[in-house]
Amino acid sequence: MRIADDHILFKECVPIFRVGGERTPTRYADDDEMRAATLDKGVFVLTDFNLTKAIDFGDFKVLESKEIRMAGPYCAFISEIIPPARIRHKREANLFAIAFSAVLSFATSRPVKPLRNLMYSNDESKFHVLAQNFSVVVAGPGAHVYNLSDDEINLFAEKTASLIELLVTVPYDKYQDLMQAIRLVQLSLLTRRDDFSLSYYLLISAIESIAQIAVKRDKVKKKDSKEKTNVWEELAKNNPDIEELYSLYKDARGKNHYITERFVKFIIDNCPHSFWEQLPHPREKEEALMREIWGDSFAEDFTLRSPLDVHPSELNEELVHEILANMYDFRSAYTHRGTETPHTDPIGMYHSFEWHTVPGEIDPDSGRQQAKVMLLPNYRLVNFIAVTCIFGYARKLAGKK
């Protein structure tokens, strides 16, 4: 990447936490001194939340957001990054900002937008130029909940620091795999409002990319019984046609990578459906904000679960397998045919699922087609599963529980 390049090649950013395959821990010497040394680097990330205080990650620092008000209900939140002292060049600083934006986005499950290049002035007017890269609605329909409590900021910092520590601990080849999966989650969060099916596809792809590494084919492949194998082999001895058919069958079985089965097993091993109840209600933050404003006079319960809302803990294992396999099928349909997911409510006010009715079998008595109801995991649940599974895999690699 050159300073004037107007594109991102994420593979150039991946090694930035692990110089030469190993991280070099350093500390910035002094806030003022380090800030002066990086003024010409001008590295920033844009978020959909207002970071009201700086976060110190030890060898680098993220400063509090600069809030830029724009026309109408739009606003931008821009945070400067003071990179590690080992990073001296503007190009490296921007690569660091891009890589960190992916890590921060993954850890917080919030969209974080890096800059493609550093072509802007270095005076105060630059913030209005930067704001055009990622503005968010802060009032009216579709408004983001952008105000964070100190507890939320501390939790964001803790999760991000924990993820970075895992990334610099795992073997370097696994680190590369994790960073690519983390990037897919970031891209999903950035595109959710622009193209829901694409963002859903990216989340599934992030899970799949690690599932294929974590779950080997032999763990899930289906073996024919010895009796069945003996029957086939006996028939094939005396019949060339059956022998050819059996050979083709064995060849097809050998080429089966069992991707769906490995995908399902990876999720069940790292984020079983008993974990899904931990997903916060979509209006939990909104309710907390209203109670903070109105106090005891605010009596409405935004997080009251609807009778139609399915609790993940109520699902049996067979249905969980079906739901997860369907998730992977949606990804395959989008990949190979461009077919969008069947979701109709991208925002999703239910806790975990959306109901979807599809044509079922024909009733032999009445001749009428029966309706079949599918449970579709909503975006928030799939994102929760992706983050939990990938985090869990990284912890196992690092030898941590």
Image (cartoon, rainbow, N blue to C red):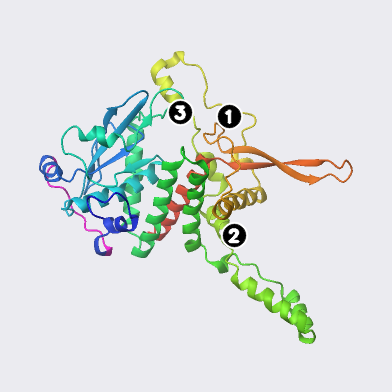
Q: Amino acid at mark 2?
A: Glu
Q: Secondary structure at mark 3?
A: loop
Instruction: Give the CA distance from mark 2 to mark 3.
Output: 37 Å
Image position, residue 48 (x, y; %):
36, 34
- Indicate which label's residue lies in the foreground, 2 or 1: 2
Task: Out of 14 and 126, give the one closest to the viewer.
Answer: 126
- Above or below, 204 against 67 in this view is below
| Neighbours of disc 2 within 10 Å: few (<14), some (14-19), many (20+) | many
Q: Are marks 2 and 3 in contact (CB under 8 Å)?
A: no
Viewed as shown, does residue 90 lie left or right of 375?
Answer: left
Q: What stretch of residues is rendered in magenta? A: 21-31
User: On the image, numbered disc 3 is attached to which residue?
Assistant: 142
- Indicate which label's residue lies in the foreground, 2 or 3: 3
Image point (33%, 28%), residue name = 75
Image position, residue 183 (x, y; %):
39, 51
User: On the image, numbered disc 2 is attached to which residue?
Assistant: 261
Image point (87%, 46%), residue name = 364
Instruction: Give the CA distance from mark 1 to mark 3.
Output: 21 Å
Q: Is residue 285 magenta?
A: no
